[in-house]
Image: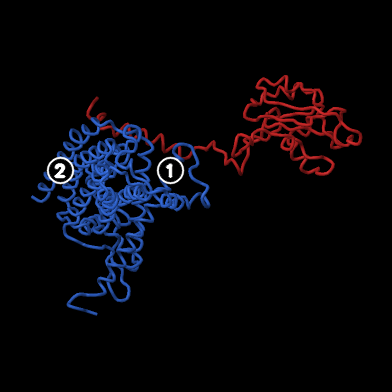
Chain colours: A blue, B red
Amino acid sequence: MVLLSLDIWLIVEKAILIFIIIGLSFFIAMYTTYAERKVAAWLQDRRGPNRAGPWGIFQPLADGGKLFFKEDIIPLASSKFLFILGPALAMTTALLTSAVIPWGGTLHIFGRDISLQIADVNIGVLYIFGVVSLGVYGIMIGGWASNNKFSLLAAIRGASQMISYELAMGLSLIAVLMLTGTLQMSGIVANQMTGNNLWHVILQPLGFVIFFVCALAECNRTPFDLPEAENELNFGYHQEYSSMKLGFYLFAEYINMFISSAVIATVFFGGYDILPFVNESKWGLSPNLLTILGFCALMAKIFFFLFVFIWIRWTIPRFRYDQLMKLGWKKLIPLALINMIITAAVVLWLKK
Amino acid sequence: MTFLESIYLWNILKGMVITFSHLFKKRPTINYPEKKRSFSQVFRGLHVLNRDEEGRERCTACGLCAVACPAEAITMEAAERLPGEENLYREEKYAAKYEINMLRCIFCGLCEEACPKDAIYLSQTFAPANYGRKGFIYRKEELLIPNPVTEPEAYQKALGDKAGKN
């Protein structure tokens, strides 16, 4: 059915895909909170939540229910509109990034080729950077609207930290973009699936490390969780928040983690490529099965990175603020620049 | 600090190896309400006022426990046994009122030591909960052990691991 030269089924297909991916992000974020508590407990020789349901698997539901039934306080002296806008923005920007990530190849069902990517824009990487930078507004607006000095301090810390680390992040990605020659996310994945099936982490180990460190900083995860430093700023920018508004902030953090893991997996670990050095299309499996396997492979990679995020959080303490800035500006940016220059030189030399 | 040290990576990796090894360690936690640790034979929990084999109260209200109590948690009032009450009280004198303030009690067990009639001992019950302070003043109803003649099972349960001791 074609209406006004617009394929209606395309819209339906994308709408379904959006619902599935948003739902999946929520579900995984929910269970990341559970995994966080469980893994934290294991790393500290404890048992973790085990009361709600078998092995405590209903714990996230219980937490969510608790947050919903808490009193929703809006401080009198706060700027009410911005106070509500803060968590909403944080959540929106966290979810927006999922649009350009290729979650799998193409499925052939109902006689149609359905791409498992919401929008295959040719500026995918730029889009991700744009949206991730918007994430600062969630923190900044929330912290400012609370009319609380601690919150404001935390918000300023968060903003400066995110801006500093975005530079190194971008520079480390430029090296990858030189290899692929495209900003399109599907192009980056395709580049890792053709030829020798080399994942970018093999060609760009330094770039990967820098990107990973910066992803930690972008998600406000330990050791870079200065915006919410409990012991200095008593909970930082979400100090005045309660009930589900607080829940939105916390939830946005976990969705950010999920999306960051997805981006890392896509850019450096072959996305939905199942194994490195292996050309999967020669296995003789049906393309649909291969797509589903690829999706599972991507999920496995994402879960691994989520685990690493949690693992790091419960291993190392928070950086001091000067250490954070020193690491960002004096270590990571020069390293990323060197990485970029070397990559550029090698690419030029190989193409001679 | 060398440059490599100053980007922290190597040290962070070492730390992560340590925490990872903890994933496989045995956890010392016991799932408390489901699993309980066994107590030592001399564990001192909440008090129990004992009865003899015929179900009569052993306490004769001599007041030695109250005197021995360093926390002054025990108060009692004595009364004389009337004819026809021989099946209730073993001695001619008995405690009409017997109260232990569990908030004052330090569970030292000196009352148990002081008692000439083996009437009071510390059981293995612990962690009582209540909504008010009043509720922690245990009266005879809370302290008396179930009657071994009429409710032998409850009696054995209340006796706990101390069954062989008396």
- Of helix, strand and loop, which one carries label 1? helix
Residue at position x 61%, y 44% from top? B34
Look at mark 1 in the image and give the residue it sits on. Answer: A39
Q: Is residue A263 visible?
A: no
Q: Which circle marks residue A157 in the picture?
A: none
Residue B109 horizontal/vertical position (percent):
70, 24
On screen, residue B132 versus residue A164, left or right, reads right
Q: Tell me what residue is drawn at x 30 percent, y 76 percent.
A: A111
Residue A325 occupies which quadrant of the picture? top left
Q: Can you tell which quarter of the image residue A77 is in?
A: top left
User: Is the Cβ of the residue at disc 1 closer than 8 Å to that at disc 2?
Assistant: no
Q: Chain of mark 2?
A: A
Q: Which quadrant of the rendered structure holds the N terminus of chain A?
A: bottom left
User: Whole-percent x and y of residue A20?
Assistant: 34, 63
Please tell me which of labels 1 and 2 falls first in the chain.
1
As drawn, which residue projects farthest toward the right?
B83
* Above-or-below relation of A99 to A269: below
Q: Which amino acid type corresponds to the residue marked 1 in the rendered image?
A: Val
Q: What secondary structure is found at the residue carrying circle 2?
A: helix
In the rendered image, the vertical position of residue B49 relative to residue A295, given as above or below: above
Of residues B125 and A338, which is closer to you in this image? B125
User: Is residue A70 or residue A113 the one in the foreground?
Assistant: A70
Residue beneath label 2, please?
A340
The residue furthest left is: A352
**Residue A92: image x %, image y %?**
27, 54
Say if A132 sits above or below B132 in the image.
below
